[in-house]
Amino acid sequence: MVFARDQWYVAAYGSEVGRSLLARTVLDEPLVLYRTDAGEAVALADRCVHRRYPLSESRLDGDTIVCGYHGFTYDPTGACVFVPGQQRIPRTARVAAYPVVEQDSFVWVWIGDRARADPTAIPRAPWLVDPRYAVVRGMEPLNARYGLLVDNLMDLSHETYLHGGYIGTPEVANTPITTEVDEDRGVVHVSRHMEDAECPPFYARSTGIQGRITRWQDIEYHPPCLYLLHSRIAPQGVHPPAEGPDDEAFHAEIVYAITPSTAHTSYDFWAVARDFAIDDESVSEYLHQSNHTVVMQDVTALNTLERVIAAEPDAYQELSINIDTGGLAARRLLARMVGSGTAAAR
Ligand SMILES: [Fe+2]
């Protein structure tokens, strides 16, 4: 699998990284994540240099990891500071330490050439840490290549068929999309504005709206990892005012981080931030359970698709239609990233 290596990827939520050792594999690289006593997140290669024992199966001693097999001990820079039975520490006794940035509740890691790691290039998802929003979230491991999840999220017409009864209604599949690509920033925008639509249970139960709605879906995909869906729900016919806040509408900011793990597996980080009923625990519980169900419907479908594609690699010619313009633009930007010298074949 060829990955875009010189890019930032989400390895974990900040809340998952603490004083125990967390194993994640990103772009085929096994990582161990933990937090120092001072609270800094650390990502090291998850293999002891001695006999490849996973450091994630080892233990923390202060800010160092002591290998669970022979006691080789590594500091947060990846340098070995102790080996058993001798004073001299071999010069090559070091594991890779990956650049880490914590932002918007995510732990971002950089797998490629660290000289190119620019933290200001990480795309933002500020709603996830904004007190004016309530957030539910999760992460599902996916037994499918990450491109299948990109395709899935760029084309929401599948909501009507795969997620009927949750977020899908006939209008989603029936309303045409507009697709724009910001070539300079490398961002794909896909919009679908439904002016007169059925309100799916996901929004009817959480907002309390009865009757039909105006439902806008505005997608921003920042390849390779961050996907934002700005969702605006309002009673039918209510549009944003020319000036001032859009108070009569309900807004959900739906965020996915799509992280390739191996050639055939991925991490599906998902979050729903809302600006309504933010103190209502029952709405949070409902949206968490409902979105988890929707994500698992996608996971099941994509795991099936991966099995089919992996078994029949050359037997299939895709056919694309109008709904696929966003997904095709995303694939083009991803291919450009992979091909521009920011990637390495593995
Ligand atoms: Fe879906």
Image: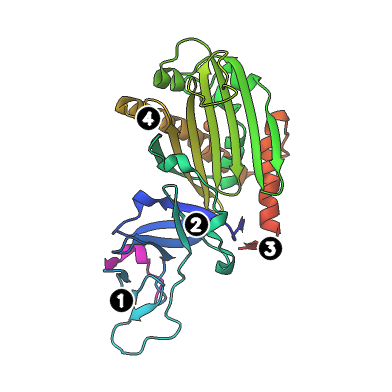
Residue at which label 4 appears:
289
Report, in whole angstroms, how far the alpha carbon at label 2 lies from the one at label 4: 27 Å
Reading the chain from its start, which is encountered first: label 3 or label 4?
A: 4
Q: At 61% across and 16% down in the image, what residue appears?
A: 195
Mark 1–mark 4 CB contact (< 8 Å): no
Residue at which label 2 appears:
26
Reading the chain from its start, which is encountered first: label 1 or label 4?
A: 1
Residue 56 in which image quadrant: bottom left
Q: At 50% across and 45% down in the image, what residue appears?
A: 143
Report, in whole angstroms, how far the alpha carbon at label 1 lies from the one at label 4: 44 Å
Inspect the image, locate mark 3, and give the three-letter code of the amino acid beneath it.
Gly
Reading the chain from its start, which is encountered first: label 2 or label 4?
A: 2
- In the displayed orientation, state which residue is furthest to the front: 243
- Please provide the residue range marked out in magenta: 51-61
Mark 2–mark 1 CB contact (< 8 Å): no
Looking at this view, is 186 or 87 the one in front? 186
The quadrant of the rendering that contains the N terminus is: bottom right
Report, in whole angstroms, how far the alpha carbon at label 2 lies from the one at label 3: 19 Å
- On screen, residue 155 versus residue 277, left or right, reads right
In this picture, is 17 found above or below 232?
below
Foreground tag (1 vs 4):
4
Residue at which label 3 appears:
341
Residue 56 part of the magenta-drawn span: yes
Q: Crowdedness of circle 3 by 10 Å Cα count: few (<14), some, many (20+)?
A: few
- In the displayed orientation, state which residue is furthest to the top: 211
Residue 198 percent location from the top left of the image:
53, 14
Reading the chain from its start, which is encountered first: label 2 or label 1?
A: 2
Reading the chain from its start, which is encountered first: label 2 or label 3?
A: 2
Mark 2–mark 3 CB contact (< 8 Å): no
Any mark on residue 70, and which? 1
Report, in whole angstroms, how far the alpha carbon at label 2 lies from the one at label 1: 26 Å
Q: Crowdedness of circle 2 by 10 Å Cα count: few (<14), some, many (20+)?
A: many
